[in-house]
Image (cartoon, coloured by chain):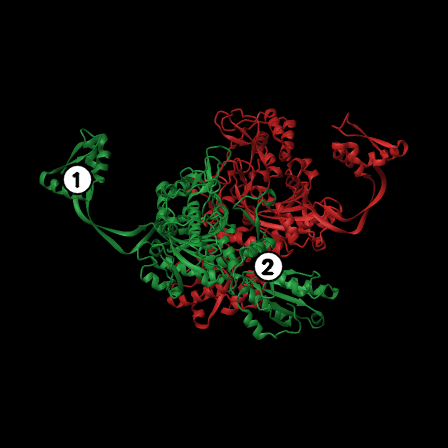
Chain colours: A red, B green
Amino acid sequence: MASTMTTKDGKPFDRSALEGLMRRRLFYTPAFDIYGGVSGLYDYGPPGCALTNNIVDIWRKHFVLKENMLEVDCTMLTPYEVLKTSGHVDKFADWMCKDPKTGEIFRADHLVEEVLEARLRGDKEARGQKVEEKEDDPKKKKKKVKTIAVVKLDDGVAQEYEEVLAKIDNYNGEELGGLMKKYDIRNPANNGELEPPVAFNLMFQTTIGPSANAPGYLRPETAQGQFLNFAKLLEFNQQSMPFASASIGKSFRNEISPRAGLLRVREFLMAEIEHFVDPEGGKKHPRFDEVKDVELELLNREVQLAGKTQVETTKIGKAVETGLVDNETLGYFLARIQLFLLRIGVDKKKIRFRQHMANEMAHYAADCWDAELLTSYGWIECVGCADRSAYDLTVHMKKTGAPLMVREPRKEPLKIEEWQIDVEKKKFGPKFKKDGKTVEAAIEALSQELREKLSLDLEKEGKIVIDVPGVGDGKVEVPKELITIEKRTRVENTREYTPNVIEPSFGIGRIVYALCEHIYWTREKDEARGVLSFPPTVAPTKVLIVPLSSHTDFKPFVRTLGDKLQDIGVSSRVDDSGASIGKRYSRNDELGTPLGITIDFQSVKDNTFTLRERDSTDQVRASLDEICKAISNLVNGTEQWADISARLPKFEGQEVD
Amino acid sequence: MASTMTTKDGKPFDRSALEGLMRRRLFYTPAFDIYGGVSGLYDYGPPGCALTNNIVDIWRKHFVLKENMLEVDCTMLTPYEVLKTSGHVDKFADWMCKDPKTGEIFRADHLVEEVLEARLRGDKEARGQKVEEKEDDPKKKKKKVKTIAVVKLDDGVAQEYEEVLAKIDNYNGEELGGLMKKYDIRNPANNGELEPPVAFNLMFQTTIGPSANAPGYLRPETAQGQFLNFAKLLEFNQQSMPFASASIGKSFRNEISPRAGLLRVREFLMAEIEHFVDPEGGKKHPRFDEVKDVELELLNREVQLAGKTQVETTKIGKAVETGLVDNETLGYFLARIQLFLLRIGVDKKKIRFRQHMANEMAHYAADCWDAELLTSYGWIECVGCADRSAYDLTVHMKKTGAPLMVREPRKEPLKIEEWQIDVEKKKFGPKFKKDGKTVEAAIEALSQELREKLSLDLEKEGKIVIDVPGVGDGKVEVPKELITIEKRTRVENTREYTPNVIEPSFGIGRIVYALCEHIYWTREKDEARGVLSFPPTVAPTKVLIVPLSSHTDFKPFVRTLGDKLQDIGVSSRVDDSGASIGKRYSRNDELGTPLGITIDFQSVKDNTFTLRERDSTDQVRASLDEICKAISNLVNGTEQWADISARLPKFEGQEVD
């Protein structure tokens, strides 16, 4: 599972350099930093905020606009009853154990994982093997278990540890407690014994309104709001199925002890789709054909349970055909997720889809695949794609009585042969008096099997005897004058069903971070400064405007260019500092600004400008209008730099890098 | 203050019809409706969500992009210490009083207001005056005080009531308690006596992390995150002042008893700007000239305190000149706010700017103007524009020691004449031994006045005597060999100051609702169906595609049109139901869809289509490309319908309305 990350150009990836850059250039910063910070809470500064907005914008076009999804915006505050019904109050928890002496709290699975891994490293060293500099998994508290006791383990024990680690996500609290006992896992800091794991609910609790009896939570996902509005959304969609709703918004998880930068946070932006589909007919998707040849790297459940991590490159059409991926709709979204990730610049070689193991799945899921991105923290779940079956709609309907279901006319009326019972209501009253209703209800509740048997009794004995608890001695005789039992055909013209839900759920913050790792590199001649090669559609700022010097002749051009770019909706930044042009460009490489316009003395003469591309540092020269058109096309994604440099004159008059 | 709303075309405005439309067409819906709902929480359905997104998008272009503001996205979860320092823990509260018998809770100011108003209505009726059907203020619980006792009041009492009402926002808890006693205000439902008002903090409280000792709140405004990051933002801005940060996100207020639809909610979208400006030099704004001739309707503090509501139409340049509006930066934003509101379609005649009275202002504000929009609930604060002075940066700096200030080189060095003291450090040790440092510190702390006096002592007596508590008997003699006191000139090249903050703060949900009231109307021939005349830039869906019938010939055109519009980023909706074309258009009038494309048999023949405009129902006919170009221009705001209908051939072949 260990993996040494490399940059796109094959050099070793330096995480601390990237994180340093991202903090220095204010992509993000620890929230409440001047108050000492709060772990798991981060603020996005201007470049991080713009980057996120751009990615959300592309997400909206790629999913919502493309398929006419019904985007909604539901509240984060959620009353207790809703999350009690959905199962989150009882089951949305991690296992934590406490050191009773120090009060320190550990997340049980992370602790087991890091202690066993530390022992395995010690074992390897004792055997004289090279210990690979293992990059930390974000789920681990990396700083706790630093020192490795160099102790050789029995071969069998080492093997056992490896197997436990391969399915670490598969254990419940009791099992984790068992592992801790069996392997004598303690507080790594002081070797103190820990209390057995207890469930810690991950929702933030609060009170809604001035009285204390209205408890509520901050939502742990945007999904519930979409489910609760299902009936209204179906009506908005003119009763037409299938359809999807979508929501982009913040959700909250009160992580026990988050430490992995932007990868494990307590407040995060999610983009979630709930695609509602008829459970009958194999959950087909009308656009599946468009994606069936998309190739994905799939890591299935069985491989993982065997303690392995080997992926298989598979066309999604094939994967659905063989049943590896359960159905077309699930498969459709896996492919669309990959296409989205590629569109924003994620490295194709660093994407895989991993199927969840049974115990790992959320309480509502019937099947689930994660899109994982390779980062220096290991493979990270960035998009989950779960089949939630009819779970949520069913429980909310049962609790509230609201019709969270589809009623549709059947193309072919359904004919059902069944035993029907008619009672002579007029005679029932006089015979059974006050018990009439009870007896009638008992008859109504009889099963088809019983009805068939009773019809024979009625024919043979002229009466039936049925159980009616609470009436007389619990047995009631009904004579044939009062009742008819016949096999008849009933015709149903309407079909009712609860849709199943396929849910692609995107952790935008994780995607943003993983993307930055994928597109970060350094130039040969300036290793100290990084370059972030965002595609122009995604880059926080699109254009850097650089006047050659602070000469007053350049000033009106700076303004004209800025206004012109603003008119076409392109964000720009001016750098008119005294630094060399090369230095100014290199500063903006760190912000990932893909394009630069230089204003020089030639510009003053003939109103032409040079346009520079970040990655190649190639330049072209053209008129203001042509430059602006090129920029507009690059930013909208309708042209690539290769197109621009082919059609506009190359500029080599000046070395600016 | 009462005002009868009319629609744009001068008919009486019918709120229940609009609210019915908005709920029916899923602009919004009570959150958790199937669970009985939670007051003050609403979900936005597809049209409401798209409308909000479009308005936010325009906001971002109008403010952030236009002025290169630094947009940030900070966390909502906020630790206790931050909001304790900002003053929110102590002061962000409303006054509530409880009925001790029923447990019912009232917001004190709203209760006083509604009871006095009810009595005034009763008084008018008793005097035989016509009682104007007063539209409710959103701050009031409209359903509580329905029945008006028809009782004539003394003239003096009626007058007193009017005066109290005019400054109802100006009372604190004790004063409200006094009014309740004086006017015998009780629970309107059962006439029960109420407990005196107590403060109820409006922030939602929670706990961050697994241990109970990390209390936190949901932020009541996005501002604090921006202030805490001030030093980093200033650095990002290359130390250049003035600059603004901006943030768009949800905030939370635990309202005591919210009842006014979208106007008083517990969770809401805010867009806030923090413009940091040098407090010296009159808080000038570099772009003030661009807006100085914008005319605003201003309602100042004095007029309100006199119990009146008369506005004055004033050019903002004039208002700043006369001091009515305190400074250029405040004035600049008031004008820009109005321009934004007009840009999204708000009715100019229904905007006014009201200055806060002293007690009404938030605890941090030095001056504040609200942009209020006229709705059927009365004049509603939709944008606040406060001068928060240096309050926030100062308190956070004091608490944390972080340098939330600007250091900048002075253009002219500052020369300061002052008494300076030099000590002979080498001789201090031997003379004072262990007390050396203490004595030195005491000398360092001497005031300018004392230094001047001591310089005379030194000259006259060859020594000075100073107070040094804790050394010897508290008096220490320093001989002239150890010390020099001289008047010298010190030159300061750097200036340090804490910026002031001008904060335009937008309640997006309120703006959305008020806008809907402003642009709602009904057609003469179909009063039952409303029209929402959103500008094309703002409308949730831009184009309705209507095939003449379900004829299969039309199907490929529907698809081509949809794809083509998607390519140019325009959202469309198809209505191929069996309803008449007129009916289909009229259904979409309710969604505010500004444009419609009809596909008819002519389209099949020559690939031309009709384009219909919602408000005029006028149509033009042109080729696919021309129609798409026209749509693109209308949606981007670069052309108006008048331009389109002038340049494309009018189509009158078919009456579709």
**Under tag 2, what secondary structure?**
loop
Badge 1 amino acid: Ile
The chain holding disc 1 is: B
Residue under label 2? B591
Of helix, strand and loop, which one carries label 1? strand
Q: Identify the residue position indicated by label 1 in the image.
A: B483
Quadrant in the picture for residue B321: bottom left
Indicate the position of residue B646 as horizontal and vertical percent values: 56, 75
Relative side of A244 to B417, left or right: right
Horizontal side of residue B301 vs A594, given as left or right: left
Quadrant including the N terminus of chain A: top right
- Can residue A57 be seen by looking at this rendering? no
Residue A418 falls in which quadrant of the image? top right
**Res B80 visible:** yes
Q: In this rendered view, identify the residue nearer to me: A291 or B430.
A: A291
Task: Name above or below for residue A268 compared with residue B330.
Answer: above
Residues A469 and B580: in front is A469
Which is nearer the eye, A578 or B552?
A: B552
Please state which amino acid type lies under the numbered disc 2.
Answer: Leu
> Please, which chain is the residue tagged with disc 2 on?
B
